[in-house]
Amino acid sequence: MKKSMLLIGCGMFLCVTCSVDTVPGGMVNKLHKALHYAGKSGEKLKNIDLGRIVLLFSSQEKKVNYTLNRTKEATKTKDVYLFPLASISGAECQSMVKQINNVSLKDYGFNLRCVTGSVPGLELSIAYDQKKVAVELRQFKTINAAKAVEFRFYNQSIINTLAKRFATSMRVSSLKKKRSLLTVDMEEQTLVRPAYWA
């Protein structure tokens, strides 16, 4: 009787272990902090930096895994990021999530929540006008070894203005010289070396 109970217990442990390991991402990420920084704005002030969201996770993996589902409707874009097997750690972080979800913004909106289903985790939904706002995602490690996922929001009209000015200055510069040392591909946003560069 004791032997059969021991075998059943071991079998249940192995099943649970295998089910966790086979889920994409492998590790359970715990969200410790959720922060939002708003950029300065106003009628007379035009800032390229509109704001950013920073999510701090504890994870043993090099990067925090996520999936992205993007939908577009006219100029409106909605990005839904799912962080599989992620959970909110503690009441303090719960309060942070509630606080940033209550933020009301003109240029973009977002909502962070726990989801259940075939792959449970944390879901961050971001809605914005793609003609007015550009979104950049990057990951880095903090001083305290936390894994940070940062979403930065930029003023798209200022980016377009700077790109046009930069392209114009590069064309004028190339006309004044006998041979151009550098070509800027504005569509691909890359620097292209001429063929005669060794």
Image (cartoon, rainbow, N blue to C red):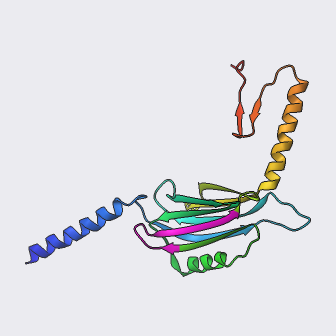
Q: How many marks?
A: 0
Residue at x 71% of width, y 20% of height: 197
Magenta residue span: 114-128
Residue at x 71% of width, y 27% of height: 193
x, y percent for residue 160: 80, 49
Relative placement, left or right, of 75 versus 82 is: right
x, y percent for residue 20: 35, 64
Residue at x 34% of width, y 60% of height: 21
Relative placement, left or right, of 88 versus 133 is: left
Relative placement, left or right, of 22 versus 177 is: left
When asked about the image quadrant of residue 195, the answer is top right
Q: Is residue 12 above or below residue 174?
A: below
x, y percent for residue 33: 59, 71
Q: Residue furthest front?
A: 74
Q: Is residue 68 above or below residue 162?
A: below
Was residue 126 drawn as part of the magenta stretch in this picture? Answer: yes
Relative placement, left or right, of 98 versus 153 is: left
When asked about the image quadrant of residue 44, the answer is bottom right
Secondary structure mainly formed by the magenta segment? strand
From the image, which quarter does the C terminus lie in?
top right
Was residue 171 drawn as part of the magenta stretch in this picture? Answer: no
